[in-house]
Image: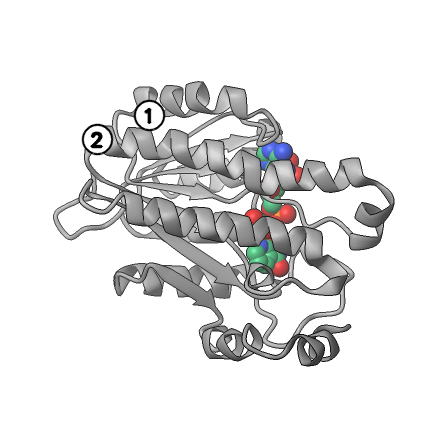
Amino acid sequence: MRDAVGAVQSVLVLGGGSEIAQAIVDRLVGGRCRTVVLGARDITALSPVAARWQAAGATVDSFAFDALDPASHQAAVDAAFDAHGDIDMAIIAFGVLGDQATFDADPVAAADAARANYVGAVSASLAVASRFRTQGHGTLLVLSSVAGVRARADNYVYGSTKAGLDAFAQGLGDALVGTGSRVVVVRPGFVHGRMTEGMQPAPFATTPDKVADAVVAGLAKGREVIWAPAVLAPVFTVMRNLPRGVWRRVSAR
Ligand SMILES: NC(=O)c1ccc[n+]([C@@H]2O[C@H](COP(=O)([O-])OP(=O)(O)OC[C@H]3O[C@@H](n4cnc5c(N)ncnc54)[C@H](OP(=O)(O)O)[C@@H]3O)[C@@H](O)[C@H]2O)c1
């Protein structure tokens, strides 16, 4: 349960290896968060980050979680909530960027990206939402992307998965009004890191730490949508309304 000043004391991360999520958890643990629960495909890889948060005074637990196995999500989320009693915040952090040329040549790979980024996020979010409804509070932080605001020709599979996720998260947030729970949609632009390694940075490229700073600031202000960096909000308001032919030219890399 959030403490008397509203600080997050417990967080569940689905996609615990995410650099962006880990930067957010760094800040939560630097505050009053004392319980971190991580769901990930490879929990052994999380040992160094778990040790860091334990050294800072947090209890860290982890469990196997695969976005591609939605049938397992409710039981995995229930086990995490049951083991820790109460979770203030859950972060839907998993995602795959993939490569459009690969997707064009391999429809099954494209479908797998859609299953992880969208289908898996739907089942995982609904599993969390049912527990938030029961406990009467909770913030679901969903890592969407500006790529979902308007699909680009060179990554439209990924962009479409984020468009679906973003719409789903907004709808879930509206559905949760009155339950004490809420959804916060985070829309980062290009973030330097493992996911974008070797890629040409897009304008307004940022870092996991800066995204995490924007998330913490946005949460403090009660925002339902957080753009990172903030300038992407007006930029993409323009971009989404450009005539199609103009968008094709400006979005080509
Ligand atoms: N980086 C960017 O430029 C950027 C921009 C906008 C939005 N985002 C979104 O922000 C989120 C976090 O990205 P990030 O930059 O932190 O990238 P990241 O460090 O690569 O994290 C992505 C995580 O997703 C996990 N994952 C992938 N498929 C999974 C599956 N089937 N089951 C469980 N976990 C799975 C990965 O697990 P493993 O550790 O096992 O590989 C990895 O830990 C993603 O949703 C991404 O789409 C990123």
Q: How many residues crowd mark 1 within 10 Å: few (<14), some (14–19), many (20+)? A: some
Q: Residue at x 34, y 39 (%)?
A: 57
Q: CA distance from mark 1 to mark 2?
A: 10 Å
Q: Quadrant of the N terminus?
A: top left
Q: Three-letter amino acid code at disc 2?
A: Gln
Q: Name the side, left or right, on which 33 lies relative to 108.
A: left
Q: Position of residue 165 (x, y in %)?
A: 51, 48
The one of 67 and 105 positioned closer to us in this rendering: 105
Q: Nearer the viewer, mark 1 or mark 2?
A: 2
Q: Are marks 1 and 2 in contact (CB under 8 Å)?
A: yes
- Judge from the rendering whether residue 95 lies leftward or rightward of residue 198; answer left or right: left
Label 2: how many residues lie within 10 Å, few (<14), some (14-19) or many (20+)?
Answer: some
Left or right of 211 on screen, residue 150: right
Residue underneath mark 2: 135
* Residue at the (31%, 20%) spot, across then down: 82
**Residue 23 visible in the snapshot:** yes
Q: Nearer the viewer, residue 57 or 145?
A: 145
Q: Residue furthest right?
A: 105
Badge 1 or badge 2: first in the primary sequence? 1
Res 19 seen here: no
Quadrant in which residue 152 is drawn: bottom right
